[in-house]
Amino acid sequence: MQRGGSRILGKASLWLAGGSLYATTCYFSYHYWRLMKSDVAASDIPLSVMEHGQRMQQFQKIANHYDDDIGRDEQVLGIPILRRMLLFFHARGTCLEVGAGTARNLPYYRTSSNVVNRVVLSDASEQMLEQAKEKIRALPVTKRSRFATLKADAAELREVFPDNSFDTVIDTFGLCSFQDPVAVLKELSRICKPTGKILLLEHGRSHSWEFITKHLDSHALEHAANWGCVWNRDLDKILEEASDDLEVDVLSRYHLGTTYYIVCRPRK
């Protein structure tokens, strides 16, 4: 059964590569002419455009309609397939997900086959976690007991979890929203077991397509104000700054270099 599932996911990944490229190209081409006339330089846009308090206020504000607003975009870009692939192939044992938000990864944990025993969904936004709790309550009882929620700052987990607490630590589209993403990665490494994995699905600057990065920079302030997300952060630089604490085993880029699929392990 697992082998069959792997074949299906393999075919899905091929579809994703073609389909997401088409969708992303269409989306950014729509803005191409206007962006080429813009005189905004990448160095003129701050990479952290919201303070922590502002970001939390925005998350509280959008929590109730977040899934409806973001769901269509994710479907078009094939994000659910990337979420499923990441968790199907790599999530094991006792898991912690930071920046879990409204629990958009909930359907993809393999709890029914006992590959995943326990999942703690943590987030700093109470309203986001309320949405997550509603989804957990809707699960069958046998699955519901595998999940728990926790209000916590991903950069400050030392008082909550000791070293080497989890087999798998997950963050999807959270590094764009943390005040100090490097500090978060170091903390994820600390609480991950030496034999465990750190799974990341993130978005950031494209180092392959200049006009796309120009688009991200030009709209960074507006996007952050709407979503609490700094979508033009340099993920390669962030990973390099955290490299003393984690080692990257897999790094794949999608959507013309703006979506990062990353599998890491802690350096102990």
Image (tube, rainbow, N blue to C red):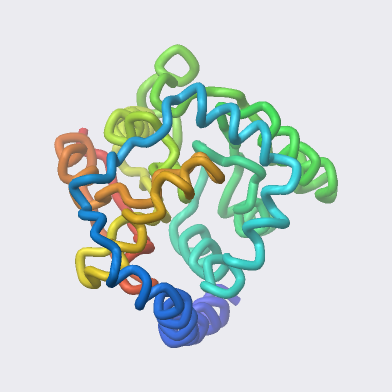
Q: Which residue ends up furthest to the top in the rendered image? A: 159
Is residue 182 visible in the rendered image? The answer is yes
Q: In which quadrant of the rendered image does the C terminus lie?
A: top left
Residue drawn at x 22%, y 45% is 44
Based on the displayed image, in which of its 4 quarters is residue 49 positioned?
Answer: top left
Asked whether, in this view, residue 139 is left or right of residue 268, the answer is right
- Say if residue 171 shows up in the picture: no
Q: Position of residue 4 (x, y in %)?
A: 56, 82
Residue 254 rendering spot, x and y as whole percentages? 36, 71
Q: Is residue 245 above or below residue 229?
A: above
Looking at the figure, which quarter contains the N terminus? bottom right
Can you say whether 157 is above or below 189 in the image?
above
28 vs 235, nearest the viewer: 28
Q: Is residue 77 left or right of residue 266?
A: right
Q: Nearer the viewer, residue 268 or 235?
A: 235
Left or right position of 41 against 13: left
Q: How many marks?
A: 0
Rendered residue at 16%/45% (across/down): 240
The residue at 43%/87% (across/down) is: 18
Which x, y percent locates residue 47? Answer: 29, 41
- In this view, 38 is above or below 114: below
Q: Position of residue 253 (x, y in %)?
A: 31, 68
**Which residue occupies 46% across, 82% down?**
26
